Image (spheres, rainbow, N blue to C red):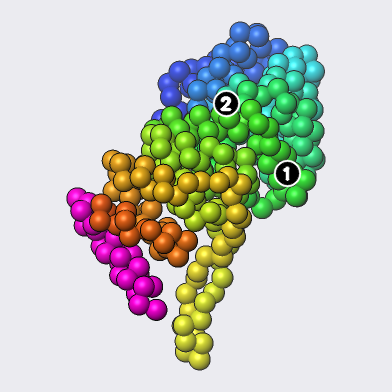
Amino acid sequence: MTMITNAALPEDVLVALDRLGNSLRLGGVPSQRLVDEAVVALNTLPVLRIISEIYNIQRKLGFYDWENHNSEYEKRERALHLLVCMPALAQVFTFHSNGYVREAALHALTDVPCSSFMLAILAVRLNDWVAPVRQAAVQCVEALSGQIDPAIVAAFGIELCGRWHEWSRWSPEQAACIESLFVQSAVHEQLVVQFAARRSGPLPTALRYFLRKPGLDTALPMLARKAQVTGVRAIAVLVLLRGHARWQTGTRRQWLNKPHGISRTIPVLAQRDIEVSVDRHELISTVLCDKSAIVRRTALVALTGCATDLPDLATFLPAFQQDDNPSVRRWAGYLLQQQEMMKTH
């Protein structure tokens, strides 16, 4: 876990956490106002900072208060007592440094996450290093998942874009909890809205991830035309022209010269056919009008693999050959050579 300075947290978040932390250090039950202020402040943090900020959040809330000479057992029991007296602390205590407290907080949690950051801490707890915490997180996510705003789920999924598959502690059951958040049609609709309208974030990577399953297939023609981010339009065009989605599942070693031990690492890919029909001629006409050379070039790259399915492709190529971008013109020339070779055989 990366440990960074207080400067990484916004000032308003530091102030809210300090106030609640000072109250917790005094040993009494904090006011509802202080707890609410801390939760509101945490809701403003971006999802991608969920791992790097956990230590700072714990420290500001006094969970690492080394000046307090109480034993770890006494501090744990005090936290568990506070949680019984004030269940509203459950959201805050999911960040606790003690596994017993995190487990109890997850069992007590009834507040639905109101931000993708607070949803992300539940995902982190599904991968917690303490097994009982992971089990409590499964029960918590299953109980709350149907109540979470689909827009929050979509934002969480786009920002982390499948990075949870890199986590190693959890079981298939715990990993499936995250995947289950994205099976609802309402979440699919919000994903489409955000892929179309957002202008920042790891959108192309996230789209590749979510195209592993067919929930977004019917939206691909619209995304190819209207998505604000060039990379999203390019991926939609590529998948539609190829007729299948492709994603990386791992890597393998490819030997270049085995006797001399020379090799390289190459990706292992999986793919599935998409569940939407597309008029390729209409799509190519749309691509010709796209303002981005990346999208136009991506379409030509995709067409190299399906040129035989489009016998009249040559009618589109002159327009690509007159493109302002030299790489687009080169790909168009290559495709035209392919077409001419096909005629001679």
What segment carries the magenta color?
A: 321-345
Q: Which residue is mark 1?
A: 176
x then y, percent, for residue 141? 73, 32
Residue 68 is at least partly visible in this image: no
x then y, percent, for residue 109? 74, 23
The image quarter containing residue 12 is: top left
Does residue 111 show up magenta in the picture?
A: no
Look at 56% across and 65% down and name the residue there.
268
Which amino acid lies under the numbered mark 1 shown in the image of this protein?
Ala
In the displayed structure, 77 sits above or below 235; it is above
Quadrant (top left, top right, bottom left, bottom right) of the N terminus: top right
Q: Which residue is mark 2?
A: 151
In the displayed structure, 85 sits above or below 213; it is above
Q: Main secondary structure of the magenta part?
A: helix
Look at 78% across and 14% down and name the residue there.
85
Residue reaching furthest to the bottom:
259
* Residue 24 left/right relative to 199: right
In the displayed structure, 158 sits above or below 164; it is above
In the structure shown, which secondary structural element does the residue marked by tag 2 occupy?
helix
Does residue 344 show up magenta in the picture?
A: yes
User: Mark 1 or mark 2, which is nearer the start of the sequence?
Assistant: 2
Crowding at mark 2 (Cα within 10 Å: few <14, some 14-19, many 20+): some
In the structure shown, which secondary structural element does the residue marked by tag 1 occupy?
helix
Q: Nearer the viewer, residue 57 or 123?
A: 123
Q: Nearer the viewer, residue 173 or 83?
A: 173
In the displayed structure, 216 sits above or below 318; it is above
x then y, percent, for residue 91? 67, 23
